[in-house]
Amino acid sequence: MTIQVSGKKSVDSDVQDNIVVDYDKKGGIVRIEIMNISLNEFRKSERKLENFLIVGKNNPGIRGFAVK
C-alpha cells in the first residue's frame, strides 16, 4: 500500500522492516509505502529470484516479470 502525501520529488528514504518513508529536500514526507514483505525477507529470496530471471532469459518460453 502506498500513501502519497505530497507531489514533491523524493530525495531521501528511511527503511525499516516493511515500511519505507520518502522525504523531499526540506525533510517533509512525500510518500509512505507499506509492503506485504519486509525488505529483509526479500533480500533472503533475492538470489532465488535472480536465478529464476536468468533461467527465463536463457529460455524464451519463460517470461520475466517486474517486481514492484
Image (cartoon, rainbow, N blue to C red):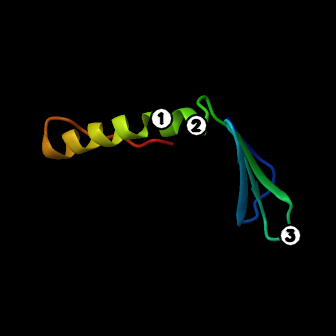
Amino acid type at image mark 1: Lys
> Residue at (33%, 43%) from the top-left corner?
50
| Foreground: disc 3 or disc 1 | 1
Residue 49: quadrant of the picture = top left
Residue that sits furthest to the top in the current view: 36
- Residue that mark 2 sits on: 40
> Horizontal and vertical percent for residue 16?
72, 42
Instruction: Tell me which label, 2 or 3, sits earlier in the chain.
Output: 3
Q: In 3D space, how far apart are the residues under numbered discs 2 and 3 (Cα atoms)?
A: 29 Å
Residue that extends furthest to the bottom in the rendered view of this protein: 25
Q: Nearer the viewer, residue 30 or 18?
A: 18
- For label 2, the SS is helix
Instruction: Specify the amino acid type for callout 3.
Output: Lys
Label 3 vs 1, first from the N-terminus: 3
Q: Amino acid at mark 2?
A: Asn
Q: CA distance from mark 2 to mark 1?
A: 6 Å
Visible residue check, residue 62: yes
Nearer-the-camera pick, 48 or 35? 48
Alpha carbon distance from label 3 to label 1:
34 Å
Q: Is the Cβ of the residue at disc 2 closer than 8 Å to that at disc 1?
A: yes
The answer to which of 41 and 33 lies nearer the viewer is 41
Residue 8, image x, y percentages: 76, 64
Is residue 68 left or right of 48 when viewed as pictured? right
Viewer-side residue, 20 vs 5: 20
| Mark 3 surroundings within 10 Å by alpha-carbon count, few (fewer than 14), some (14 through 19), many (20 or more) | few
The N terminus sits in image quarter: top right
Return the residue at label 1: 44
Q: Residue at x 59, y 39 (%)?
A: 39
Q: What label does residue 26 carry, if any?
A: 3
